[in-house]
Amino acid sequence: MIRIVLVDDHPVVRMGLRGMLDAEPGLTVVGEASSGVEGVALVLAERPDIVLMDLRMPGGDGVEAIGRILAATTGVRVMVLTTYESDRDILRAIEAGAAGYLLKDASPKELADAVRAAARGETVLAPSVASTLVRQVRSPAPPALSAREAEVLRLVAAGLTNAEIGKRLFISEATVKTHLLRAFNKLDVADRTAAVTTAMRHGLL
């Protein structure tokens, strides 16, 4: 028997999910929570096999709850079940360790099959979500420079030396070099010219 906890702030949604899942052979809902905070406490008490987690709820973010659950338990698989499919939501949930990402327009059979697959250790993604992840992998987000690293690179682009940059920013020349080296590492380049060129190409300057 696969034991399931539902975490969603809408009682009607939880009621529908419970009826749908309890009607499936081998599946049983052992608890419901209306927020991420309540969900974490319930999971720690019940130790279910699967958690169906909404993302945006008052009183506790779903992604934060996923991280807390996975940090405090072993063997519990958390699946996102939400109406939201923005790139940011998807990436945050997957990075937090979600075992799946489904949308609430899934059919009862799709949902039950996904729960069983997650319980077997598989990762389950709605087709649109899988497409988003593929797109992100093929076109990864540009590297993120700190405000100071970007400032130093802008001054490099303006033709200033390390010493001149240090005087302009009231920092030591050694600190300028440290910022540059960190920027080189993030941009995967080996020199000042390449760093400026790459940063400009990514729209970071």
Image (cartoon, helix red, strand yellow):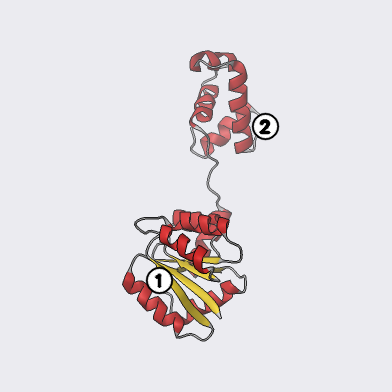
Residue 43 horizontal/vertical position (percent): 49, 65
Mark 1 neighbour density, 10 Å: few (under 14) some (14–19) many (20 or more): some
User: Which residue is painted at 37% across and 73% down in the image?
Assistant: 14
Question: In what element is the residue under mark 1?
Answer: loop
Residue for badge 2:
190
Q: CA distance from mark 1 to mark 2?
A: 47 Å
Residue 175 horizontal/vertical position (percent): 59, 21
Q: Is 49 in front, or is 114?
A: 49
Number of the label disc, if any, that sits on residue 104: 1
Count of marks overlaid on the render: 2
Q: Is 20 in front, or is 137?
A: 20
Q: Is residue 67 above or below residue 173?
A: below
Residue 200 in sight here:
yes
In the picture, residue 84 is in which quadrant? bottom left
Q: Is residue 112 above or below residue 152?
A: below
Mark 1–mark 2 CB contact (< 8 Å): no
User: Which residue is painted at 51% across and 33% down in the image?
Assistant: 146
Mark 1: amino acid:
Lys
Mark 2: amino acid:
Ala
Mark 2 neighbour density, 10 Å: few (under 14) some (14–19) many (20 or more): few
Residue 100 in sight here:
no
Task: Identify the residue at the far right of this view.
Answer: 190
Q: Is residue 57 left or right of residue 1?
A: left
Identify the image quadrant of the N terminus: bottom right
Residue 103 horizontal/vertical position (percent): 43, 69
User: Which residue is painted at 47% across and 57% down in the image?
Assistant: 65
